[in-house]
Image (cartoon, rainbow, N blue to C red):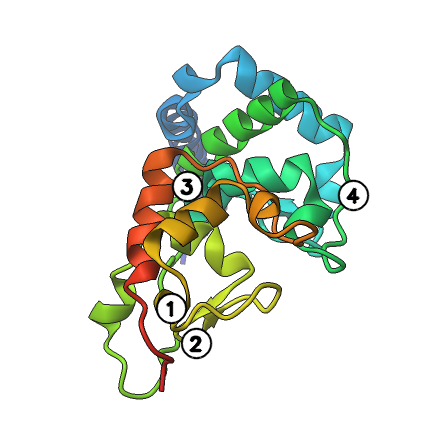
Amino acid sequence: MLSKSQARAFFLSGTGVCGLAFIGLTVDTFSRIPAQTHSDQITPEVIRGKDLWDGNNCMGCHTLFGEGAYYAPELTKVMDRRGPIFVRAILKDPQAMYPNERKMKNYHFRDEEISDLIAFLSWCGKVDLNGFPPQPVLMPVALPPGQSAVASQNRPQIFNQLCVACHTLEGQGGQVGPNLDGVGSRKTSEEIRRWLRDPAAVKPGTAMPKLPLSEEQIGELAAFLSQKKGATP
């Protein structure tokens, strides 16, 4: 059994060691922050985007870095999950992207403000949060019977980021737009190109918005979709 003086010495030395360990871990944590947050990539655009995020109370509906509301999608990895085209389109006109469904308010952001928000969200997605949230999976997680994972993954990334938000293909996707199984039997590659360039010019009054796709992306999607012949079993 320890004497009072020994117990006091043990307590004080233990407290000192634990305190030094805590200080050391704190210093180490703070020293990692610049690298983990990529602070060198915080540009004026990122700062303006953060101001827009705060000023419009986006966290009142969305979650970022695990903080915020859970009414709307979590956005920490939104640029990996959806990409800049989808984010730009939905910030420009939420209702056009999801006719009669999307609840998001149209803030009427200017194009430069949307670019600033995209810069901010892109920076957020690069912050090292030690594996949180998990890296988005852009491929189907549930495959129809008899369908191989390899075949399902053979899709353009822009399709998995953008098109599946509204359309269904091979059992995965949204229900807003038409099912795309067998679309290659109904439309030629050139018809798909014309549709993707300007849906309203092909079918006035269509609910599908004109998306800011490059010619390269339009060609990639047209080539992919024109190969989809016949309905999926």
The answer to whether marks 2 and 4 mark residues whose Cβ atoms lie closer than 8 Å is no
Residue drawn at point x = 35 percent, y = 25 percent: 35
| Left or right, residue 88 beside residue 143 | right
The local crowd at label 4, few if under 14, some if 14 to 19, many if 20 or more residues have their Cα within 10 Å, is few
SS at circle 3: helix
| Left or right, residue 159 beside residue 64 | left
The local crowd at label 1, few if under 14, some if 14 to 19, many if 20 or more residues have their Cα within 10 Å, is some
* Image location of residue 153, percent across then percent down: 27, 63
Disc 3 and disc 1: Cα gap in Å?
53 Å
* Image location of residue 10, percent across then percent down: 41, 43
Q: What residue does disc 1 label?
A: 140
Q: What residue does disc 3 label?
A: 14
Disc 2 and disc 3: Cα gap in Å?
61 Å
Q: Quadrant of residue 217?
A: top left
Which kind of residue does numbered mark 1 sit on? Pro
**Comes first in the chain, label 2 or label 3:** 3
Disc 1 and disc 4: Cα gap in Å?
29 Å
Q: Examine the rendered structure and indicate whether residue 211 appears above or below residue 183.
A: above
Is residue 70 in view? yes
**Comes first in the chain, label 3 or label 1:** 3
Q: Nearer the observer, disc 3 or disc 4?
A: 4
Is residue 8 in view? no
The local crowd at label 2, few if under 14, some if 14 to 19, many if 20 or more residues have their Cα within 10 Å, is some
Disc 3 and disc 4: Cα gap in Å?
56 Å
Which kind of residue does numbered mark 4 sit on? Lys
Which kind of residue does numbered mark 3 sit on? Gly
Q: Examine the rendered structure and indicate whether residue 181 appears above or below residue 190.
A: below
Q: Nearer the observer, disc 2 or disc 3?
A: 2
Disc 2 and disc 1: Cα gap in Å?
8 Å
Which kind of residue does numbered mark 2 sit on? Gly
* Image location of residue 14, percent across then percent down: 41, 41
SS at circle 2: loop
